[in-house]
Image (spheres, rainbow, N blue to C red):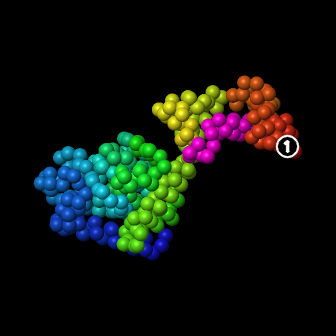
Amino acid sequence: MNARFHELLQQQEREDALAASDEKLAAEYVTEEFKEAEALLGSGRASSFFASEGNLRAPFIPTRTCGRFYMKKHTLSQRPYLHTHDFYELIFVIGGICRQNPETFPLLREGEACLIPPGTIHKIEKCSAGDIILKAVVPPEFFRRVCPEQIDEVKIFSRFSAPPVIRLFCESCSDNLYKEQAEEALLRLILIDMLRRDGSFIQLEHYLGANLKTASLEDFAHSLGYTPGYTSRLVKARTGRTFSRLLDEARIDRACALLSDGHTALYAGEETGFATPAGFHRCFLRVKGITPAGYARSVKR
């Protein structure tokens, strides 16, 4: 990680530590960040959002608000508190772990990210010295310009590439020429990369693993709560392949494992959901470029 990145992390730690001891600075933070700033400031010390141990208990669930894109480290000074917001929030775990509401949010580990849409109630637990958690505030209009998908629910990304995220963080903390254009370009690439990686489609992998013999686009769409047409487009957008192609590949991969274990082609075809031996033979040849019998001979050598 570059020196500028570490310098910015330390700078933000110092700024929040200072706000914890300076009521005026803390009040400026609350005024800028919350729709209900007046009510929050009237209910107690603004600096209580920082430093002290334990959860912050506000008299109501406050709404964070922002009309510009920016990124910030989740600092050691910040206290956990339930809140919602009128923007999208992206959480990237560069190092360590990130804990949120344990009853509704999974633990995020290094290399994982989370997208939280507007209106979601959540909190981020207090971090430790080894945690590097970056939070991106993305106004709805900005998000719609850069994200290729409509996302209305909390989404966990199992993988992301750290260098472009770190570059985006450094860019957001700068006054560089064409800053906004750079932010849009970087965030668009980061989102596309994460959607492709998870394109993976962890849900699809799990579904095929559990339903290989009976899998269908309609059943998978039902499991997601989407229409078959939308699911078909989503699978193609994320993986570059059709559902039927992915299903064929998953079935043939499983058939190869069975053939390698010494099972017959008839058994392998039946166990992977093919209705007829001829259909299994055609699909195997199309996917692997070799017949089941030819494959079985090759693995015995």
Report how many numbered discs are placed on residues in the image: 1
**x%, y% of residue 292?**
81, 36
- Residue 8 visible? The answer is no
- Residue 264 visible? The answer is yes
Quick one: label 1, few (<14), some, or many (20+) residues within 10 Å? Answer: few
Residue type, mark 1 in image: Ser
Identify the residue under disc 1.
298
Q: Secondary structure at mark 1?
A: helix
Does the stretch in magenta take in 260? yes
Q: Which residues are magenta?
A: 236-261
Query: What residue lies at 69% left-to-right and 39% top-to-bottom?
Result: 249
Q: Is residue 38 left or right of residue 222?
A: left
Quadrant where the image shows the C terminus: top right
300 over 267 or under it: above or below = below
**x%, y% of residue 207?**
57, 35
Does the stretch in magenta take in 15? no
Among the 4 quarters of the image, the one containing residue 182: bottom left
**x%, y% of residue 146?**
45, 54
**x%, y% of residue 5?**
43, 70
Q: Is residue 137 left or right of residue 215?
A: left
230 over 270 or under it: above or below = below
Query: What residue lies at 83% left-to-right and 37% top-to-bottom?
Result: 291
